Amino acid sequence: MNIFAQEIWARRKIIIIFLFAILVPTIIVGFLSWNAFSKRREAFRKIFESQLWMSGETAITSIESALLQYEDSILSPEYFAPLSTLRGSGQEFKQSALLSGAKIFVLDVDFRVVYPQAENDDRPFVRWEQSLAGSPIAFLFQKAEDLEFAQKKYAQAAELYHKCSHSTLIKQWQAFSLERYGSCLVSAKRDDEAFSVYKELLEKFGQFKNRLGHPYGLLAVLQLYDLAQRQKKETDLLKTLIVTLDKLRNGAWLLKTSTYDFYAEEIESILDRELSSERYPEYQKSYMAVRDKPSPYLKELEFKKILTENVAPIIKERMAFSQYSNEPRKGRFPVVAGESSYLFSYSLLSDAQSDQPFYAGFCWDLDYLKNQKWPEIANTLAQASGIQVRLIDERGQNDSADLENAIPENALSLHLRQLPFPWRFIVVQTALEDLKSSALKENIFYGILAVAVIGMMCLGAFLIARDISRESVTIRQKSEFVHNISHEIRTPLTLIRLYGETLKDKKNLPEENKREAYEIITGESERLSHLINDVLDSSRIERGKKEFNFQTGYLASAVKETLESYRYQFKKEGFTVHEEIDTSLPAMDFDREALASVLINLLNNAMKFSPGKNEVSVRLFRNEAHAVLQVADQGIGISRKDVGKIFQRFYRSQNKVVSESQGSGLGLTIVKHVAEAHGGKVEVESEPEKGSVFSVILPIFKTKEDEK
């Protein structure tokens, strides 16, 4: 009990020393260092935050200056001068790459849209009819109209229209005549001739418009489709309809929104109906590609509508107000149309050639500015001042809480003063962000370091405690060994002394008694010698100095001699030994005394742990290239958890019989060591209450592997 108490106290002492001498001081030093780092970082953070507002204002001013400079570069008089003369001139204008997606516009002095020319209300027939009034061609055309509309004589009217188309060189009049010629042929049920006329009208005069401003390129293709349907003829009109739809969506004809929608819906309804059966897969693919592609002309129509309904009235109002103030005749303003928001800039310019004033402006391309222009400005600002400015687009931000969450901590939120963009600018001091990043890295590093140090200290404490525990167990086992070995030695010594004194004092003992005394003294001496040899062998094995005397001999004779010398112990303990020795085993190299010690140890254990079942079997047989020495008993057996531990020095099972028996605890350790020294091994087969079988397996012929 004293050893156990010392062991427990040793463990507690180690834990107390670890806590108060190592762990607690380490935690205190770590906490103080961490606190010092935190205070230093907080001081730097306050310094940077005090400079953030001034830096932010400077950054916003610089950004706005760059954007205003970009605005001035677009609103250049030289750039817009050609646009002011486009109305009615029939000229086209290609937009400069400077705008990069921004949409420009021009208003005349009456605030009418001059550019873009998305719609054209011009009806040239009225103008040309007035210029040709009283001419033979005009008289012939009026007569044809009278026959068509008043008298319903379509055949005669058709002849006159046909004559008109060949009586003039003016393309527009030729187109008008052909249109009426085809219409009369349709009314006269002359579909084949009408088909040819409309086909000519489509191919030669597709860009011209009729009296109502409808292009013949659209009107003729629909009429051709109706005629083909009436005649039930196979034509290539589906391809023509797809091409016509693509031209319409790309702005081949300048139309009103209502006219555009009418023809687009008509053509799409025809194509949807004809291609729904998947009869023409190649046309279906082409049609889907055209329909899914955005329509540039439709966007132009929408843009012109915004200009007419929103932008022009605002500029007109501002110009009227500027007459009574000193405000400059330029500016910018936001416009909301539907679900979209826009920003327009404008300026009052003058044409250098005609000296006519006009209003020029453009709609900012916010997406281009945000994704293309803004990164350039932000990078230039960051390199020049070390200020990092982030842009948050407020379009579509319905939840103010989400918008606030997008703003980093210790950042400044600002808006531009002159340019009402739907953006918020977040100004962040780069040094402050670097400080936060450095603080985070330091926290992670020192945290990992602290955990690693504490973990290593705990591991060291655990290993020390484990070593102390093992040492304590070893000390306890050695104490038990000394106690047990003392009892083991005392018994034979007592018997030797007793029978020695008997032989000395009683000289007239019968020969039979003397012989018995001699046998007891000899047997107990051998037992004592065996016990002492076990202790010495264990000591040599522990120090690595155990030597073996290998000689060539017959293992069967060595086993028989050992059993014969142990007859006294069998008789004394009342055991019956069953021998099965194979004398045909060949000669082999082995240490005779070491193997005798192995057999005696196994026999001692068999007799010691077989209470009430006094039978032991000893077998020696050959198994292929091995000799097997086997000792079997019918004793208490060994549990599965103890099988792997019984070969350890001083180990004793928790079984009651084992605990009460005497022994050194070295026998099986020596058995294993001797077997391995001979290049063999020991195997155990055992179950509790069913006995045990120990097999020492030794090689008869040593192989190269055995030699190694």
Image (tube, helix red, strand yellow):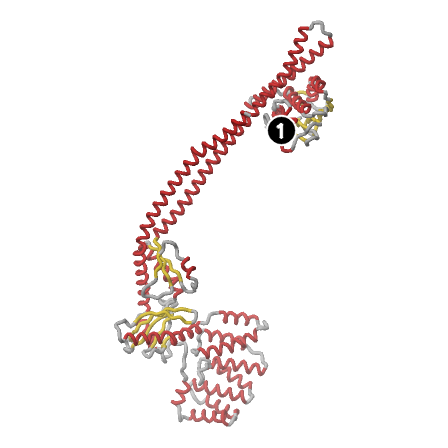
Q: In this view, does 280 lie to the left or right of 28?
A: right
Instruction: Give the image quarter of residue 697.
Output: top right
* Residue found at the far left of this picture: 326
Please name whichever residue, 698 or 331, is drawn nearer the observer in this view of the structure.
Answer: 331
The answer to whether residue 231 is left or right of residue 621 is left
How far across and down, in percent of the image, does residue 613 sit? 72, 25
Within 10 angstroms of label 1, few (less than 14), some, or many (20 or more) residues? some
Q: Quadrant of the C terminus?
A: top right
**In x, y percent, where is residue 502?**
67, 8
Q: How far from the left and from the top, in percent, is residue 659?
A: 63, 26
Q: Tell me if residue 31 comes above or below residue 68 in the rendering.
A: above
- Where 251 falls versus 466 (above or below)? below
Please name whichever residue, 242 or 620, is drawn nearer the observer in this view of the structure: 620
- In the drawing, does residue 522 fall left or right of residue 239? right
Query: Looking at the figure, which quarter contains the N terminus?
Result: top right
Q: Nearer the viewer, residue 369 or 208?
A: 369
Q: Which of 525 and 700 is in front in this view?
A: 525
How many circles with numbers are drawn on the protein?
Answer: 1
Q: Name the residue under label 1.
A: 653
Q: Would you place residue 615 above or below residue 314 in this image?
A: above
Q: What residue type is labelled 1?
A: Ser
Secondary structure at numbered mark 1: loop
x and y percent of residue 97 in the render?
A: 37, 67
Q: Can residue 341 be seen in this view?
A: yes
Q: Judge whether residue 116 can be spotted in this image.
A: no
